Amino acid sequence: MNMPTVAVVGRPNVGKSTLFNRIIGERKSIVEDTPGVTRDRIYATGEWLGREFHIIDTGGIEIKDEPFQKQIAMQAEIAIDEADIIVMVVNGREGLSQDDIHVARILQRAKKPIVLMVNKIDNFEMRNEIYEFYSLGIGDPFPVSGSHGLGLGDVLDEVISHFDNLNFEEEEDDSIHVSLIGRPNVGKSSLINAIIGEERVIVSDIAGTTRDAIDTKYTVDGVDYTFVDTAGIRKRGKVYESTEKYSVLRANVAIERSDVCLLVLNGEEGIREQDKRIAGIAHEAGRAIVIVVNKWDAVDKDDHTMKEFEEEIRKQFLFLDYAPITFVSAKTTRRVHTIYPLINLCDESHKRRVQSSTLNEVLVDSVLMNPTPRDKTGKKLNIFYGTQVSVAPPTFVLFVNDTELMHFSYKRYLENRLRQAFDFTGTPIHIITRQRN
């Protein structure tokens, strides 16, 4: 299901990151009382009254040419372009500034719903400070104390009130949705063209050429597929390109709509930190994953090169030990035919359901082979029974005598046993422990 995207925007040092952390319930954004400390957009998922949404924390926008201001302004404009709803944050202690007026004018050009939040209103007497912000002409100001959480509920009520006016077209079909994710210029567009055998996506050597997400439907051997190319960001106004920072949000959106993700690596360049970052998003989202090493034709190799590269992938992507790997060349189409069987295999694993009786037989055998751990007092973990509660990804609940006794290493052991018994190639699996009353 597609979720609305909310961007938190404003000049530096008005409390955007504090608000962001309050909404998502964790300190994911660095908070420091220094203007410009948040240089990159940061993405997370928030929830209010049962309504989920993506939220983007941005750097500030300023008129002055301070260090990083050009880059921060660029990122904020990109976030505005990506958002469905914008929360503009101003500083109630400092009052209205020229920078606030500048930000408001940028937001008005976006022609999207704007919620104006006056932050740092820490007591009732300070509420009189909010009225000057009416002059911005972007709606009623909401007084909030981000550090104490006061008034934040009113802001979120206003944010979600706009959700019903958003038009998300949900395409219900039985095709396997496949997204190609990875850094710019690893060959995602070329790979789609090679997979479907026609020039449906513009291909260029310039990183970030693809501007919009393009869905390509294709049928092979009676199986329907929908390929989603993870696009870059549209160039808008004076937003200049820095493609390494673009790919994460687009990957988020594509992953959200996918059954299987093809993580495309550049065989020429090797593995980069951005590759691991994007792979982590797909893993945490619970999507099936196939690792595709592209541009293999351009690699100088001998009889050991492929094995050595695969070993390096396993070393760098320890959390993707379940993902199959294939080496291809989109340019020559060599070994591209190996991708479809892997997509099918991973999709089947991702949606596999196991009968409770069979699951519990495997659990009993697993405990016999490797008895459950004890804590320092000698108390032993007892697994009473297990059941599968969902698919995509396969999720299992184990009812135990004490959840604190389930050590990470033993949970990992059980996961490996389930993989051996039921072949969950290409998909993460989740094991949840519940204490039986």
Image (cartoon, helix red, strand yellow):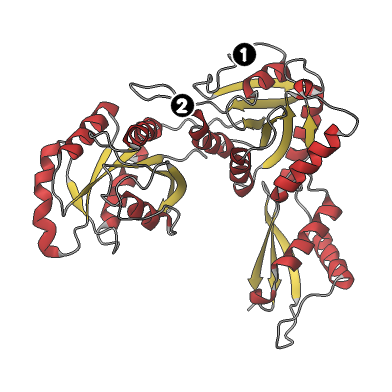
Q: Residue 100 falls in which quadrant of the image?
A: top left
Q: Quick check: 311 above or below 401? A: above
* Residue 432 picture quarter: bottom right
| Horizontal and vertical percent position of residue 374 | 75, 81
Kind of residue sitting beneath label 2 = Ile
Q: Is residue 427 left or right of residue 84?
A: right
Q: Position of residue 415 (x, y in %)?
A: 76, 59
Could you say whether the residue bearing mark 1 is in a helix, strand or loop? Answer: loop
Q: Nearer the viewer, residue 77 or 164?
A: 77
Disc 1: CA contacts within 10 A as few (<14), some (14-19) or many (>=20): some
**Is 92 rendered above or below residue 437?**
above
Out of 244 and 77, give the one closest to the viewer. 244
98 on left or right of 111: left
Nearer-N-terminus badge (1/2): 1
Specify the label residue 233 is tagged with.
Answer: 2
Q: Position of residue 276 (x, y in %)?
A: 63, 42
Most distant residue in the front direction: 67
Q: Could you tell me which residue is drawn at 79 percent across and 32 percent down?
A: 326
User: What's the residue type where badge 1 is placed?
Assistant: Arg
Q: Using residue 406 as the reference point, say whether residue 154 is left or right of it.
A: left
Mark 2 burial class by Cα count in 10 Å: few <14, some 14-19, many 20+? many
Q: Is residue 199 visible?
A: yes
Q: Quadrant of residue 325?
A: top right
Q: Residue at x 62, y 20 (%)?
A: 189
Q: Which residue is mark 1?
A: 200
403, above or below 127, in the image: below
